Image: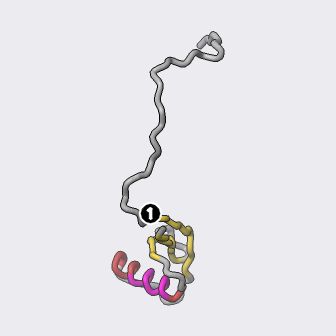
Amino acid sequence: MVWATKLEIRYEGTDTTLPIAFDGTLETAKAAFEAAHKAQFGFVYDDKPMVVEAVSVEGLDAGDGRPVEQEQATSDATPAPGETRAIFC
């Protein structure tokens, strides 16, 4: 299993977060956020604190991509209801 962690970071007082890959160090995340913010908006704030609004972790299966399922017996029987009630709408 391969794990991918992302931080949704924004500047305090703003409402737009940017997804940043997180490798475990805040310094790297800060540099990546500033680079992404500059690329998208054309500037960075020197004096505004950054807010981590959300953290997401995605697990990626490192297998060959095919699901492994056991064979299950099937039946063509029609199940009978356990109870029937009348409703009025």
Q: Quadrant of residue 19?
A: bottom left
Magenta segment main secondary structure: helix
Expressed as whole percent of the image width and height from the top left, the position of residue 20 reads 45, 75
Q: Quadrant of residue 40?
A: bottom left
Within the magenta stretch, is there residue 50? no
Quarter in which the C terminus is drawn:
top right
Q: Can you identify the residue that label 1 sits on?
A: 61
Within the magenta stretch, is there residue 34? yes
Front position in the image: 17 or 67: 67
Q: Amino acid at mark 1?
A: Asp
Q: Secondary structure at mark 1?
A: loop
Count all numbered tags in the image, as a single digit: 1
Q: The magenta stretch spans which residues? A: 28-35
Q: Quadrant of residue 52?
A: bottom right
State how the image is colored: secondary structure
Expressed as whole percent of the image width and height from the top left, the position of residue 43 reads 39, 83
Judged left or right of residue 40, residue 26 is right
- Residue visible at 51% across and 74% down in the picture: 9
Expressed as whole percent of the image width and height from the top left, the position of residue 46 reads 49, 89
Front position in the image: 83 or 28: 83
Front position in the image: 56 or 39: 56
- Residue visible at 55% across and 69% down in the picture: 55
Q: Is residue 59 above or below residue 32?
A: above
Q: Residues within 10 Å of mark 1 (few under 14, many from 20)?
A: few
Expressed as whole percent of the image width and height from the top left, the position of residue 21 reads 45, 76
- Residue visible at 39% across and 83% down in the picture: 35
- Residue visible at 45% across and 47% down in the picture: 69
Judged left or right of residue 42, residue 49 is right
Q: Is residue 47 above or below residue 5?
A: below
